Image (cartoon, grey):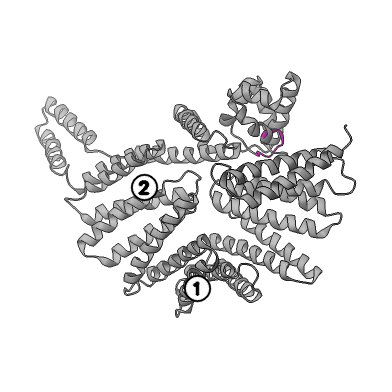
């Protein structure tokens, strides 16, 4: 028998304790957090949707409800609780740091869910552990010099002049080389560690200055080492940012700009172009996490950097970078096309399609660079899909062929990220094709294939490492589950509606009202629609709850649409809320 999650066991205990004390969720929120804004978190716990919360994030509730250590231990024993090793280590050895980071995150994100808080703390705990390990490996000459001087003194005291002279000779040599490249590396490592500390605290400018300072130590000795230092640090920041909701992409991009300038000063255009490609890649990823206005400027910059890189790299001998910069340029062009939409976006989609086809047509690309071939094939399908606007049968079939080819190539090349992206995109196309198909059985099977494709992708996109991809995949899965439920209208309808609710709620762990208000509002609208549909099912005893929940979701969406000026969506949600209110008024009281 499968154990329940720790979160579900704890949530049941919290609800039991709250009920015994006669507290509402609002009252408990005020008692535990001195704020009514944390009702959402209490609701998440009591409903069992938070699978594995860390005790650090639930301390206020534990204190407020006087939950004992034994009661917590019982929840752990009754569940599949798996503590996060990094966070446990950080709480034991750097409790003040974790408390300070948690306090700052709560201050900046008062409406964050438990899932978002846990993901943030676990990411910071990983950063702390890695930083601690790097500090522990720092080397220095002073300790060795002190040891040699002590040994020389001891030898002199023993009358061993030869040994004393040998120790002093070693000390002399060490002092002479103290400011050589070897020592500069040690000094730079310390400065980089200082930058890491500043970055961990959120001081991005301070971190950038420290990293540049570390690289500048090499200026008088080895410019290649200076540039290499900037590159390595930028790559590390970028990789960490891809796995976290809290990213520092701008710092990485600025470091690569510095490396580019240094290479151009050396007259090395090829290497400078490679740095421009990397900066463009980071800038595009940064745009994915920014608001619409900021994202537009960032994509424009990424396109410019890619064009500059491509102009140089296609003339060089490095076929890998020549292909990657074309792929990344195509991705940026697609992003711009989606931002513009309509006729204005078509020119960008067309250019992207040409670029991807050119990469795939290159002789030997699948044998020499299979990882690039699967990227290009997947992105070619994405360009066809974006251009088709989901209603062009020929373009949709071309996209589906490209995605399936990308999935096969990525399996051969051991590229799980592209394999997952291919499955997500396959799900998107199958969902669109099902809308265009007239045969009911074929439509249903296409939807089932789409559901399976999304579920496969989720296995590669865990929330804590790929939040953006996880959120979009759960959103796509939820929409097709909802469509399938509404089309079936049989005994399986309720099951698919409930699955859709679960996936939408998972997506909301990424798309909060603050981080992406329009996506949040869209999901609220769909949740309202699902609860409204559920209230219509035969034999349902939860009509009142369904109506009340639907009204809440429609009102949530309306508040955002009104603030953002989306009048049509506001009118739709307002009408839906009124309809559900009329139905609720007609429900006999319990």
> In the rendered view, does 423 fall on the left or right side of 335?
right
Q: x, y percentage for residue 156? A: 11, 28
Query: Which residue is label 2 attached to?
Result: 251
Q: Residue at x 52, y 67 (%)?
A: 379
Crowding near pointer 1: few (<14 within 10 Å), some, many (20+)?
some
Query: Which range of residues does the magenta coloring cover?
Result: 45-51
Instruction: State the residue at coordinates (15%, 44%).
Output: 177
Report which residue position mark 1 lands on. 350
Question: Which image quarter: residue 579?
Answer: top right
Which numbered disc, 1 or 2, marks the residue closer to the eye? 1
Task: Find numbered disc 1 in the image and state the secondary structure of the residue it sits on.
Answer: helix
User: In which quadrant is the N terminus drawn?
Assistant: top right
Residue 39 visible in the displayed image: yes
Membership of 50 in magenta stretch: yes
Q: Classify residue 167 by image quadrant.
A: top left
Residue 104 pos. (x, y %):
47, 31
Q: In the depicted view, which residue is nearer to us: 307 or 457?
A: 307
Q: Is 493 situated above or below 337? A: above
Residue 290 sits above or below residue 129 on the image: below
**Label tally:** 2
Q: Nearer the viewer, residue 549 or 90?
A: 549
Q: Earlier in the sequence, mark 1 or mark 2?
A: 2
SS of the residue at dot 2? Answer: helix
Name the dominant secondary structure of the magenta segment.
loop
Viewer-side residue, 440 vs 73: 440
């Amino acid at each position: 028998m499968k154990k329940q999650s720790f979160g579900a066991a704890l949530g049941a205990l919290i609800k039991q304790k709250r009920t015994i004390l006669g507290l509402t969720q609002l009252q408990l929120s005020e008692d535990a957090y001195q704020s009514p804004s944390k009702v959402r978190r209490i609701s998440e716990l009591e409903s069992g949707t938070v699978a594995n919360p860390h005790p650090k994030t639930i301390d206020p509730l534990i204190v407020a409800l006087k939950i004992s250590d034994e009661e917590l231990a019982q929840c752990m024993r009754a569940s599949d609780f798996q503590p996060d090793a990094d966070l446990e280590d950080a709480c034991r050895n750097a409790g003040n740091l974790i408390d300070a980071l948690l306090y700052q995150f709560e201050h900046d994100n008062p409406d964050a869910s438990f899932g978002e808080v846990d993901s943030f703390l676990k990411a910071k705990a990983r950063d702390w552990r890695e930083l601690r390990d790097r500090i522990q490996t720092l080397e220095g000459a002073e300790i060795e010099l002190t040891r040699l001087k002590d040994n020389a003194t001891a030898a002199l005291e023993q009358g061993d002049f030869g040994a004393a002279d040998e120790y002093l000779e070693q000390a002399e040599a060490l002092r002479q080389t103290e400011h050589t490249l070897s020592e500069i590396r040690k000094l730079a490592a310390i400065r980089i560690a200082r930058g890491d500390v500043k970055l961990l605290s959120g001081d991005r400018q301070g971190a950038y200055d420290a990293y540049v300072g570390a690289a500048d130590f090499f200026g008088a000795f080895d410019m290649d080492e200076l540039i290499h230092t900037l590159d390595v640090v930028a790559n590390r920041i970028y990789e960490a940012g891809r796995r976290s909701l809290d990213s520092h992409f701008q710092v990485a991009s600025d470091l690569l700009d510095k490396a580019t300038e240094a290479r151009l000063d050396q007259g090395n255009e090829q290497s400078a172009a490679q740095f421009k490609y990397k900066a463009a890649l980071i800038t595009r990823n940064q745009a994915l996490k920014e608001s619409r206005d900021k994202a537009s400027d960032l994509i424009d910059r990424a396109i410019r950097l890619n064009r500059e890189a491509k102009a140089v790299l296609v003339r060089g001998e490095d076929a890998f970078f020549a292909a990657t910069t074309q792929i990344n340029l195509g991705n940026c062009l697609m992003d711009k096309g989606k931002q513009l939409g309509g006729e204005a976006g078509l020119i960008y989609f067309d250019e992207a399609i040409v670029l991807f086809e050119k990469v795939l047509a290159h002789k030997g690309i699948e044998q020499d660079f299979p990882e690039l071939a699967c990227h290009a094939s997947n992105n070619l399908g994405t360009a066809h899909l974006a251009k088709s606007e989901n209603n062009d049968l020929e373009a949709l079939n071309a996209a589906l062929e490209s995605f399936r080819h990308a999935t096969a190539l990525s399996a051969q090349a051991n590229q799980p990220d592209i394999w997952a992206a291919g499955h997500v995109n396959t799900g998107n196309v199958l969902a669109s094709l099902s809308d265009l198909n007239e045969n009911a059985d074929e439509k249903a099977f296409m939807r089932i294939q789409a559901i399976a494709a999304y579920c496969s992708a989720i296995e590669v996109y865990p929330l804590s490492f790929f939040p953006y991809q996880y959120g979009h995949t759960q959103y796509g899965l939820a929409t097709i589950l909802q469509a399938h439920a509404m089309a079936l209208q049989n005994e399986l309808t309720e099951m698919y509606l409930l699955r859709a609710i679960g996936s939408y709620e998972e997506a909301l762990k990424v798309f909060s009202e603050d981080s992406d208000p329009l996506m949040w509002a869209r999901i609220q609208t769909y949740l309202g629609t699902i609860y409204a549909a559920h209230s219509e099912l035969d034999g349902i005893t939860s009509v009142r709850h369904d109506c009340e929940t639907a009204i809440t979701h429609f009102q949530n969406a309306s508040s955002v649409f009104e603030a953002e000026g989306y009048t049509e969506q506001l009118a739709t949600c307002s009408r839906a809320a009124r309809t559900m209110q009329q139905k609720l008024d007609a429900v006999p009281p319990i």
